[in-house]
Amino acid sequence: MKWLPSVINSRWIDPLKALLNDSRSIGIILLLCTILSLLVANTADGASWLQFWQTPFHQLEKLYLPHTLLHWLNDGGMTLFFLLAGMEIKSELVGGELSTFKKALLPIVAAIGGMLMPALIYTICNFGTVYAQGWGIPTATDIAFSLGIASLLGRKLPSSLKIFLTALAIIDDLGAIVVIALFYGGKLQLAWLLAVLVLIVALYFLFKRYQHPGWIHYLLGILLWYCLLNTGIHATVAGVVFAFFIPASHLHSLQQRLHKSVYFVILPAFALANTAITFPEQMSIVITSSLSWGIMLGLFIGKPLGISLACFLVVRLGYAQLPSLVKWKHMIGAGLLAGIGFTMSIFISTLAFGEQSTQDIAKISVLLVSSISMLCGFLWLKAACRQSTLRKTL
């Protein structure tokens, strides 16, 4: 039986490790979870699936805590996602692609253009309507999907473009965090806000005195989350605040520890819960709604247009230059991939609208346009890479 451990390793453990370390698998798992949730939600027993995520915990509500599974995922689980995103942002600021002004300028400008243009297009489509507050939905980019699709092209895609897309998506995440904090919270509760400020000061001095994060750091972090939950500012902001206090020397190890649980547990659970959508009997509602058109045009047209125009402007003015081996056709392809909103766009949909039916229309629109952006972005970049290869051989 000595051979049994090696068989288990070769057949199960090694393939599982390969799956967890493959950047493409994150997007595939999220896609499978979405399809599964949509299928279950639209079967005869779909109501039970929807009700499961809305299971109430009345005792927790009395303690001012999230009181359904869906709320725990959106307010609690996503805080860990934002903690990881915050650490990635700080890593890039300290020693990565955002560490100098020259390095950071192009992706920063691209991210700003990629947020403003979709917001503008959405606002034009929904100006004066009850959907006007949803302008933040098409401004987001999903890191996991955009980089996962880019990874499918392998070495054909210039590595500098992947680095640019990573930096762009990280800055985009930071922008989404700011948008959520400023525009999608509730009425500010000053007493809770004062407690938040006290905890932030306490964390600052604690990290200054004891740099290695210990149980007291995490306890204060949990208290910060709890107080933010009740301030009217969205609780997920606590993850980013805590991340920015973590010393640079400890970022990498904490990122490694958190990465798999966030991307292979929390985000799949988020996808299952937030795409539990019952399709409306009249799907024409989705096609004819200005809400849908604002989201779809914002992500599919606004993202590549805003990113490309913003980059063209700073390059033309001589303030920046395109990454090595990257042409404008590659930048348009990166813009198309940035139109994959998915996780963040769905998340903002739940914050922008209170009515479930409106949330569902927004989520269906995000899923449709994200699928189109995935396909078009992949095909565009594949064709661009093939043209570059042909020119080298001629």
Image (cartoon, helix red, strand yellow):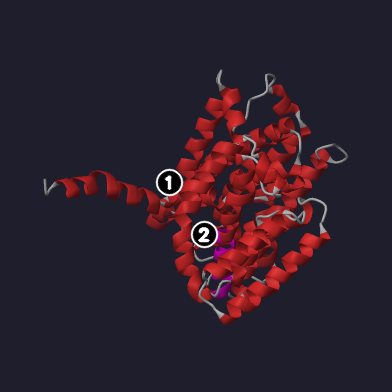
Can residue 90 be found in the magenta stretch? yes
* Residue at screen point 58% across, 81% down: 209
Q: Is residue 318 above or below residue 340?
A: below
* Residue at screen point 55% across, 21% down: 45
Residue 302 in sight here: no
Crowding at label 2, few (<14), some or many (≥20) Cα neighbours within 10 Å? many
Image location of residue 287, percent across then percent down: 70, 27
Magenta part, dominant SS: helix
Q: Is residue 220 above or below residue 364?
A: below
- Total numbered labels placed on residues in the image: 2
Q: Nearer the viewer, residue 162 or 208?
A: 208
Give the residue type at disc 2. Leu
- Residue 195 placement, left or right of 100: right
Callout 2: SS: helix
Callout 1: SS: helix
* Residue at screen point 47% across, 36% down: 32
Q: Nearer the viewer, residue 299 or 70?
A: 70
Residue 25: assigned label: 1
Image location of residue 228, percent across then percent down: 71, 58
Residue 223: assigned label: none
Can residue 318 be found in the magenta stretch? no
Q: Is residue 201 above or below residue 152?
A: below
Residue 161: assigned label: 2
Span highlighted in magenta in the image: 84-94
Q: Nearer the viewer, residue 65 or 349?
A: 65
Image location of residue 313, percent across then percent down: 70, 63
Q: Nearer the viewer, residue 291 or 271?
A: 271
Of callouts 1 and 2, the N-terminal one: 1
